[in-house]
Image (cartoon, grey):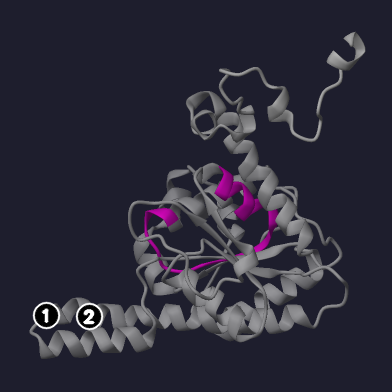
Amino acid sequence: MGSEMCIRDRSDPDKNKPKGLPDLLKAYEDMSFLHSREARPLRILAEYMEPEARFKEYNIADTIVFFGSARTKSREDAKKHLSAAKRHNGDVAGAERDLAMSQYYEAARTLAHRLTEWSKTLEGSDRRFVICTGGGPGIMEAANRGASEAAGINIGLNISLPFEQHENPYITRELCFEFHYFFMRKFWFTYLAKAMLVFPGGFGTMDELFETLTLAQTGKLSKRVPTVLFGTAFWDKAFNLDALVEAGTVAPEDLDLFHQTDDIDEAFDYLTCELTQHSLSNPVGYM
């Protein structure tokens, strides 16, 4: 009789639980804890480990990152907005500006298409120089769209924001990420990047550009990341880096950290030459 009392029914654990006790919840299943201040290190680590696992699953060796404004429209959409503005007495000047800026959407789309076609010709089982963007509209959409139209997989590192940011429909679904922490998103931009194309943009674009230039200038990057500023007229007006050289706050050779152009062919030739010479034999992402 005594030995029988020690036998438990392991097929149904709830049969052995004393009546009146609440159900126990494991810490990693407790959403109120996981969203608490105390669990912030776990959330940060998750935004490192989960993308890493997915990149490994899909054999993503490295990337070409596109930055630029989320507000830039495609030529087709810009023409529609201009036509509507003229019909309804709207902001014609703004619509004309958007149409002029749409050249950068189309340039990003074309470059992403050509770079994807080029990368698909490379030998090896790893996916090399995959197009990567911030996952949103504008220039990001253009680059994901160009890669998708070339039948290539592409990456979107989206981030939760109260406005402007929503994932575009051209990202490869399995490689569409949603980040909470800006710094973890920036890590993945830089860690896998072997080249960057920077189109006209606002504060976010400037932030990503100058952070990358700072990492390169200070020797924190152990790899070469050729960077193209596309849109000479815009960049010459947006900032005067020659003034920094004149003031002695940067060295003249620091201006060699990037290449400026308005020409799609020149940008493509520059990047593919740089990648072939300096990155093709190193199919891994690193800082």
User: Marks 1/2: CA distance?
Assistant: 9 Å
Q: Position of residue 168 (x, y in %)?
A: 47, 70
Which residue position holds label 2? Answer: 95
> Which mark is drawn over residue 90?
1
Pointer 1 and pointer 2: residues touching (CB < 8 Å)?
yes
Residue, x 50% and y 51% (percent of image)?
210
Q: Amino acid at mark 1?
A: Gly
Q: Position of residue 3 (x, y in %)?
A: 92, 12
Viewer-closest of 116 and 104: 116
Residue, x 56% and y 71% (percent of image)?
171
Residue extending furthest left?
89
Instruction: Write down the quadrant of residue 118 in the picture.
Output: bottom right
Viewer-closest of 16 and 54: 16
Residue, x 16% and y 84% (percent of image)?
85
Earlier in the chain: of badge 1 and badge 2, it is 1
In the rendered view, does 125 fall on the left or right side of 54?
Answer: right
Please tell me whether residue 76 belongs to the stretch shown in magenta.
no
Quadrant in the picture for the N terminus: top right
Is 122 situated above or below 193? below
Q: Which residues are magenta?
A: 184-204
